[in-house]
Image (cartoon, rainbow, N blue to C red):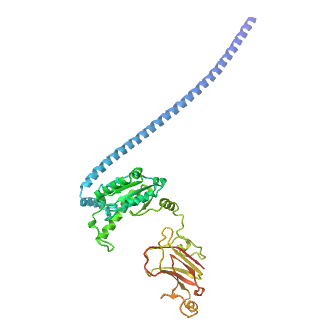
Amino acid sequence: MRLRNASFLTLLLFGLCALLSLSWYTTFSGSRGKHTGDVVDVYQREFLALRDRLHSAEQENLRRSKELNLVLDEIKKAIAEKQALKDLNKTWASLSEETRLKLWNVSSSKNVLQLPSIFHHLPHLQHPESLQPAVHLGQGRTGVSMVLGVPSVKREVHSYLSDTLTSLMSELSPAEKEDCVIVVLIAEADQQYASSVSENLRSLFPAEIQAGLLEVVSPSPHFYPDFSKLRESFGDPKERVKWRTKQNLDYCFLMMYAQSKGTYYVQLEDDIVARPNYFTTMKNFDKDFGKQHLHKGHITQQQNSAPAYQGDDFFWAFTPVAGDFIRIRFFTPVRVERFFFRSGNIEHPGDKLFNTTVEVLPFDNLQAEKEALTDSKDKTPKYQRTEDGFYRIAWFHSGVCEGEVEPSFGPLEAIRLTVITDSPVWVILSEVGHLD
């Protein structure tokens, strides 16, 4: 019995140990399996992410491949168009002018409105060499502040072109020579003459040409139309029409050539003498351009005067003739003590009023005539009166007129500036002021 109990106890202890061992193994195995599962999950996620990146890279590669194919197609297309344009130019040049005009009219006769091109007005420019300079001497300098254009034509007696160029360049400092380019236009269709002038300038100014300061160009003979077919206009004879047409075309060619070279363009005659410091003077004027007031404003009590009076604008007119006038009418009669008018401005100092009067129109003309306007000594009229009731009280001198208005005039209905004789220049009235 004791032995049987001991055996049972031994068996029980063995079972407990086995149970504890099994529990420990299960716990250990579960922990280890969980760790292994986490690692597998991490690798699986990284693999999936890598697969997505590879897919994106493949798609990006396809897009880039398509873009490269498009670029290659555009390059091929551009090369083909350039070659086609060359072939078209050769074909076009071989056609007569009459045929080219007919083709142009046919191509433009669609049911779509089209703006006229330069070829409608200057059909001779359809020649492929019309806009290519026949003579071109220089380094093609660009990016300068100022381009000085000097058109020159064949002179019957003596040419001052070389003297003008010497004067212009001698008055430039080294820094100024780097900041400008002088372009001489030999405005002659005679290629032999243009080439001879060009070679002469090359021999006279080799250093200036080599440095890029001086350039010489001449238009192609195809740039000019048939001058014998020009229509007469403005009452000018045919020779005058030919002269001014050619001059306009010469200036156009020179400006087109100079356009891409600098910020400002100045056109000069070919027989001038340069003043010292001329380049800096012009450059400083351009720098201050827009900062100078071209007209001066005044404060008005009623704020109903013309824009010129407020300084927002100015009066401007073509060459006035005798009898032309500027009239300032007041909405309600105003007593004016003083007046001031200035013509011309900093841009156009010569556009002044000459031989022009200031006239006033009293609101009560009868009272003004009774009170004012006689000289107390001999009772003669003190002011000249016009047929429409204005009194002439002052004249412009050197483009300016200012003065007082006698109180005996009373309130004024209007002030008028009247031109007495034809003016040789345009007119700008830049400042208008009165004290009331």
The residue that appears at 58% across and 91% down in the rendered structure is: 371
Quarter of the figure with the C terminus:
bottom right
Report x, y in % for residue 73: 36, 43
Q: Position of residue 288 (x, y in %)?
A: 53, 62
| Foreground pick, 416 / 287 | 287
Residue at 34%, 55% in the rendered image:
200
Residue at the extreme bottom: 378
Q: Is residue 47 in view from this perspective? A: yes
Q: Quadrant of the N terminus?
A: top right
Q: Please give left or right for residue 373 compared with residue 11 in the image.
A: left
Give coordinates of residue 391: x percent, y percent: 52, 86
The reply to whether residue 113 is in sight is: no
Question: Left or right of 104: which side holds 398?
Answer: right
Q: Residue at x 29, y 69 (%)?
A: 239
Residue 194 image position (x, y, % from top left): 31, 57
Direction from residue 324 to residue 12 in the image, left or right: right
278, above or below 394, in the image: above
Q: Nearer the viewer, residue 336 or 163?
A: 163
> Against 181, is 14 above or below?
above
Whether residue 301 is situated above or below residue 227 in the rendered picture:
below
Q: Nearer the viewer, residue 154 or 405?
A: 154
